[in-house]
Image: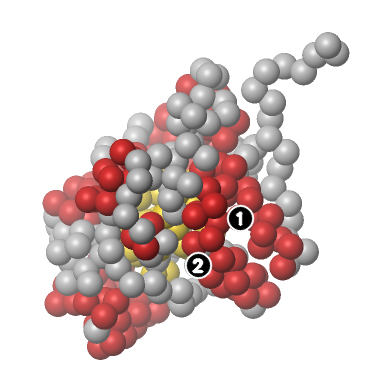
């Protein structure tokens, strides 16, 4: 997601919005790929709008993860990998988001699927079944399968969001859709990926991410390369909040490179 009606740059032609977004943040979640495999030409335009070190975390199509549940998915997987090839190193990780019904008993299926993936990409898995967070044996089983494959476990932290009842229409809508799972903040690889959902009130969002400021700073000191995605129910302030999160981490780890200066939406004038 790199375009929102409330974000700077939304007034630009659609072909220029990613370039503008990339001047605010240096990573993006590719959520649209969950619904349809993009045309290779479209992906090539994404590459043309971003620097080589920009990070795309692209979600595998739902036909692979939800409809075929990682079984007999060779054809759509090959089509997806072919489509995203123009990104090259910008494809930071391929994101395998599994449905809430994907249970510990399904981990062998995940292991077989991961074992058959090409080594040219990194992989990150998001699970939503409660047992992976409340049953130590289930958590160990999943962590072992991911570690064997060199894949990361992506936490989707909604604890700050669910800490208080919703107060806006966007929050009420998210209240019924987002997963409620316990907090998990252990990295399995040198490239941890975190998804964090705050509130529409920026103060509540900042309050809720302090744990992640600590964890991210620690990961950086350990030599890891974390990627953090900041969401709110309406996402209106997400780019500015992401930059604020980066600033808070950089205050702990001064050697962390600053984010780029955002491209002005309107041309600069003398008056």
How many numbered circles are shown?
2
Whether residue 186 is visible to the viewer of this picture, yes or no, is yes
Split into 4 quadrants, where in the image is the C terminus?
A: top right
Tell which circle, 2 or 1, labels the residue nearer the N-terminal end. Answer: 2
Q: Where 49 falls versus 111 (above or below)?
A: above
Tag 1, which secondary structure? helix
| Image side of residue 241 versus residue 40, left or right | right
Decide: few, some or many residues near mark 2? Use Cα within 10 Å; few <14, some 14-19, many ≥20.
Answer: many
The residue shown at (26%, 80%) is 134
Q: Nearer the viewer, residue 267 or 123?
A: 267
Residue at the disc numbered 1: 245
> Closer to us: mark 2 or mark 1?
1
Residue located 72% across and 16% down the image: 267
Q: Is mark 2 on a helix, strand or loop?
A: loop
The N terminus - image quarter: top left
Whether pointer 2 and pointer 1 mark residues with C-beta atoms closer than 8 Å, the reply is: no
- Percent x, y of residue 33: 33, 42
Q: Residue at x 32, y 55 (%)?
A: 165
Q: How far apart are marks 2 and 1 (CA)?
A: 16 Å
Mark 1 surroundings within 10 Å by alpha-carbon count, few (fewer than 14), some (14 through 19), many (20 or more)? many
Quickly name the residue at label 2: 192
> Is any part of residue 149 visible from this angle?
no
Front residue of 261/192: it is 261
For the residue pair 71 and 242, the one nearer the viewer reads as 242
Using the image, determine if residue 121 lies above or below residue 111.
Answer: above
When asked about the image quadrant of residue 9, the answer is top right
Where is residue 109 drawn, in percent x and y? 19, 71
Q: Where 55 falls versus 46 (above or below)?
A: below
Is 23 positioned to the left or the right of 179 in the image? right
């Amino acid at each position: 997601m790199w375009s929102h009606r409330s974000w700077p740059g939304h007034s630009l032609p659609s072909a220029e919005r990613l370039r503008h977004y990339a001047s605010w943040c240096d990573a993006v979640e590719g959520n649209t790929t969950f619904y349809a495999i993009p045309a290779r030409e479209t992906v090539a335009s994404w590459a043309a709008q971003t620097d080589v070190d920009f990070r795309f975390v692209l979600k595998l199509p739902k036909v692979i993860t939800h409809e075929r549940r990682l079984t007999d998915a060779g054809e759509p997987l090959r089509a997806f990998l072919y489509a995203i090839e123009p990104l090259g190193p910008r494809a930071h990780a391929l994101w395998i988001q599994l449905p809430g019904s994907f249970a510990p008993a399904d981990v062998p299926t995940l292991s077989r699927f991961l074992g058959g993936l090409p080594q040219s990409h990194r992989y990150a898995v998001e699970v939503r079944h409660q047992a992976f967070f409340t049953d130590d044996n289930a958590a160990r089983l999943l962590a072992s399968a991911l570690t064997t494959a060199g894949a990361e476990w992506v936490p989707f932290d909604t604890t700050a969001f669910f800490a208080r009842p919703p107060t806006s229409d966007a929050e009420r809508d998210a209240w019924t859709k987002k997963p409620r799972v316990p907090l998990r903040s252990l990295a399995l690889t040198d490239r941890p990926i975190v998804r964090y959902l705050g509130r529409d009130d920026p103060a509540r969002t900042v309050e809720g991410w302090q744990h992640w400021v600590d964890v991210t700073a620690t990961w950086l000191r350990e030599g890891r390369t974390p990627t953090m995605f900041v969401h709110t129910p309406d996402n209106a302030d997400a780019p500015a909040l992401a930059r604020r999160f980066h600033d808070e981490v950089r205050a702990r780890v001064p050697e962390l490179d600053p984010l780029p200066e955002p491209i002005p939406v309107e041309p600069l004038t003398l008056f």
